[in-house]
Image (spheres, rainbow, N blue to C red):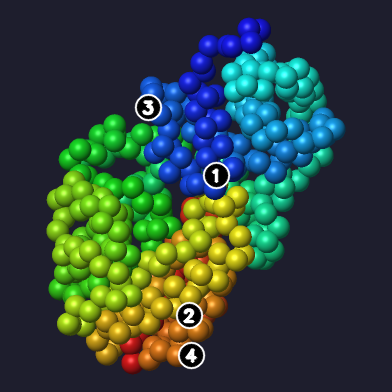
Amino acid sequence: MPENPPPDPTRDSALFLLIETLDRHRTLDAALHALPGGDGRDRAAAHRLAATVLRRLGTLDAVLDAHLRRAPPSVVRHALRLGAAALLFLATPPHAAVSTAVALTRRTGFGAFAGLVNAVLRRVASDGGAALDQLDPPRLDTPPWLWASWGEAARAIALGHQSDPPLDLTPLPGVSPLPAGEVLPSGSLRLPPGSEVTTLPGYQEGNFFVQDTAAALPVRLLGPLAGQEVADLCAAPGGKTAQLVLAGARVTAVERAPARLARLAENLARLHLDAELVNADALTWRPGRRFDAVLLDAPCSATGTIRRHPEIPHLRSPRDLDTMVAAQDALLAAACALLKPGGQLLYAVCSLQPEEGLARIKAALGRLPLRRAPIGADELPFLAEALTEEGNLRTHPGLWAAQGGMDGFFAARLIRL
């Protein structure tokens, strides 16, 4: 093999994504945005390859470490991970998986390790499948602190993280055309993983928007909203805003990041929906009026979206939760202050962490003029298993596993005294 192999856009880009996420601690979305331009198919293939490594990192390292006497440089380890992921999880022919990893090693200036990469991946090609049978991938691919925090549901959640997630759409009422897909009991339209939303029939017409089926549940817990004044705090990218408008509410959507507010505006424009958009920090926003309902989809650790953002377990730590919960408590107080007496507060987080869910509600009830409004089984008859004994909503990736799972969400409904 030549010392300077020709570029391989897929592997080169996948390596860039791993360096950005694992070494520089950037989100995968940010890394993709920074990725130099290229063919859309190459970018998609690089994303899939890198995401597979991130999703199965513990398992891949366990397989590779069995053949390594000492830790190689970070770039070489990434090349090994990419080759092993191609072999074990993406059905890449062994010759192609090994040769492209060796070429990547040479191309990045680590030619001295090319023989090591070749030897290790050949061993993985010959016995990696058997090695997997001796491992516990769900445990290996989940940081111990996350596994412990998820309790009895940990294995089901971790298994849900192993596969590429489907694409869920929320259709607008009575529109056509719509893509062909599975209609879930919740009413969401589910398409296979890898579906490109902008090419689907009805996208340009604004007939649907992307929203995981779990993310579509909280708004419906507010009940009939026709004619009500509703504040949607931390509103971007706007899926819940759209649901509120479609329910007949007069919606004020608040978002502090100008770029995210612009994205929300673009999404509503495509859907031909209208809301009052406010560029403000929900913590300090004082509109001079009170609302019938407030939806607070609070910033959080986002561990409920790991299957869509597989870098999250490698970027988060327990220390992050201290900052998150302090912000959530402050936002709950701000949301409560915006409500009329008797008004509804719907608190939601795309988190699996109990500190960001039930613990925040218990804290709010102890210091704010709020009471619980438990969610009844009749409100979500198709997903009764997601209701807690306190009357809150708790979804996770292990639910509806046969249909492709769902994101993790916590939601609680409260009433202003």
Mark 2 — residue? 361
> Within 10 Å of the Cα at label 2, are there few (<14), some (14-19), or many (20+) other Cα atoms?
many
Q: Secondary structure at mark 4?
A: helix
Q: Is residue 234 visible?
A: yes
- The reply to whether dot 4 and dot 3 touch (C-beta < 8 Å) is no
For marks 3 and 2, the one nearer the N-term is 3
Residue at mark 3 to residue at mark 1: CA–CA distance:
20 Å
The label number, if any, that marks residue 366 in the structure image: 4
Residue drawn 40% across and 73% down? 347
Callout 4 amino acid: Gly
Q: Secondary structure at mark 2?
A: helix
User: Is 167 situated above or below 14?
Assistant: below
Residue at mark 1 to residue at mark 4: CA–CA distance:
40 Å
Label 4 vs label 3, nearer the camera: 3
Mark 1 — residue? 24
Q: Secondary structure at mark 3?
A: loop
